[in-house]
Amino acid sequence: MATNNNGAAETVRYKECRRNHAAHLGRQAIDGCSEFSKSGNDGTPEALLCAACGCHRNFHRKEEQPLSRRQELRHYLFRYLSEAAAAGPPPPPPPPRALDHARPNDVRSERLGEEKTEDGTQT
């Protein structure tokens, strides 16, 4: 599966071979290969060669089909879950913080201009 410039997912298939085998003679001759079938595993250079006609994949007509909305959602969900699994489990939450108990001498009076002194009386 691939994505196009708009970000929409689509499937790509390579159809009939369009290589002109008689181009050096100034003529038109195609081999009749109806669909590309790779001759090697993915990621190897042989995967770009057709097992039926021996031509490079670029000689085959590229057919792009947009996915249906359901297939597209399935594709993105699978990709999201794969990335989440590769990232590993989320980190544990931070430990709970102890409550800060205010001491009476540290708390200011709610009324403006009044402060508590060292012995706890207000001025």
Image (cartoon, rainbow, N blue to C red):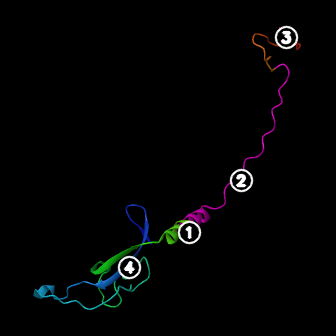
Image coordinates for residue 88, horizontal then vertical, percent: 63, 62
**Tag 1 and tag 2, C-beta contact below 8 Å:** no
Identify the secondary structure beneath mark 1.
helix
Quadrant in which residue 5 is drawn? bottom left
**Circle 2 residues within 10 Å: few <14, some 14–19, many ≥20:** few
Residue 100: within the magenta?
A: yes
Quarter of the picture containing the N terminus is bottom left
Residue interval drawn in magenta:
79-105
Q: CA distance from mark 4 to mark 2?
A: 45 Å
Mark 4 sits on what residue? 13
Indicate left or right for 19 with 118 as reference.
left
Amino acid carrying label 3: it is Gln
Mark 1 sits on what residue? 78
Amino acid carrying label 2: it is Pro
Quarter of the picture containing the C terminus is top right
Q: CA distance from mark 3 to mark 1?
A: 66 Å
Mark drawn on residue 122: 3
Q: CA distance from mark 1 to mark 2?
A: 25 Å
